[in-house]
Amino acid sequence: MAYVQVEADDRLEEGPEGLQFKSFLGADGGVGAGNGQGAIRSGVGNTDRGYLQDQQSQRKGTSAFWTVEYYQPYFDVDTQTVLKRCYATLLPTSSNYLSTHLNPADLYGPFWTLTTLIFTLFLSSSLAASISTYLSGPGAEYDYDFRLLSVAVSLVYAYGLAIPVLLWLGLRYLGVGEWSVVEAVAIWGYGQFVWIPVSILCVIPVPIVRWVLVFIAFGLSGYFLVVNVYPILASAEAKATRLIIVAIAVLHAGLALTFKVLFFGYYVVDKIGADIPLPGSDSPAANTTASLVQRAFFSLL
């Protein structure tokens, strides 16, 4: 066996400086990116790193409260979600409504709930009054009282919008910041949903049925408000703040009674027994007056 001496190649001794590497991959490191055209860089960009904010977030942050863009997120909800939130108010187990259903809270559902209640109150009461007038006597005519519509607008919006805003302001003054004004309005607005089907059913000209329906609506909506508002009041340092729930219950009872008297107080008045003459007078006018008194008495029942 023979050994041949080989001289060292000077090119191998140039070191790392003499080596040149060429990458055939694109800037994103993917296969086939280096095709001679400008490769599109993918991965984490400036927006993902937080250097650039999202354009929508910038609009929300710079919008003033008197602009439409400020309130636009509170109306960004679909009909199916609104209906689910309305139906959930009818369940007695809706004690934690803020976290289970109002996430996030909206103003679209409360606004249309209160507006629908206004129209159902006026239409149902007008229909009930016309039916009662027709059944009370032949040839009786009924004139629609459009003042009830203005009363319904003032009453429903004042209770569904003004009361929660005032309550929120009062709690903020007392140092309770457990909820926002949007959540307060949403609780009150969705809580009045039960009055919509009740106002339609109160077209039935039966006094006991109407009283039962009003009592059911008062109980469901009142329970819903109490179980969702009382935990907020209980978080206050002053224990006397919890007594606000009593004022809420009184206001709610007054609302139910007002609905019953103004909108659900039309009945079929039948003449029961003979006319009661006034003492010392047998004139037809006196008998007519007694008849009117009877009608007024039975209409209050």
Image: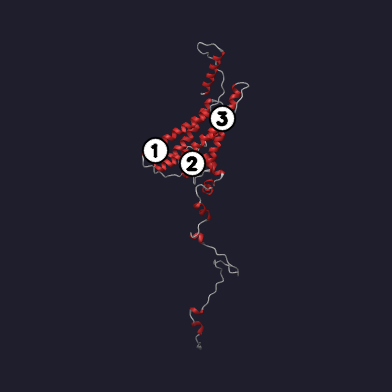
Query: How many neighbours does mark 1 have within 10 angstroms: few (below 14), some (14-19), or many (20 or more)?
Result: some
x and y percent of residue 212 in the render?
51, 29
Q: Name the residue under label 2.
A: 185
Q: In this view, does 93 lie above or below 291?
A: below
Q: Can residue 296 be seen in this view?
A: yes
Mark closest to the chain's N terminus, 1 or 2: 2
Query: How many neighbours does mark 3 have within 10 angstroms: few (below 14), some (14-19), or many (20 or more)?
Result: many
Q: In this view, does 23 lie above or below 283?
A: below
- Disc 2 marks a residue whose amino acid type is Val
Q: How many labels does the image show?
A: 3
Q: Name the residue under label 3.
A: 125
Q: Name the residue under label 1.
A: 242
Marks 1 and 2 in Cβ contact (< 8 Å): no
Front position in the image: 66 or 122: 66
**In the structure shown, which secondary structural element does the residue marked by tag 2 occupy?**
helix
Mark closest to the chain's N terminus, 1 or 3: 3
Mark closest to the chain's N terminus, 2 or 3: 3
Q: Quadrant of residue 27?
A: bottom right
- Disc 3 marks a residue whose amino acid type is Ser
Q: In which quarter of the image is residue 121?
A: top right
The circle on residue 111 is none
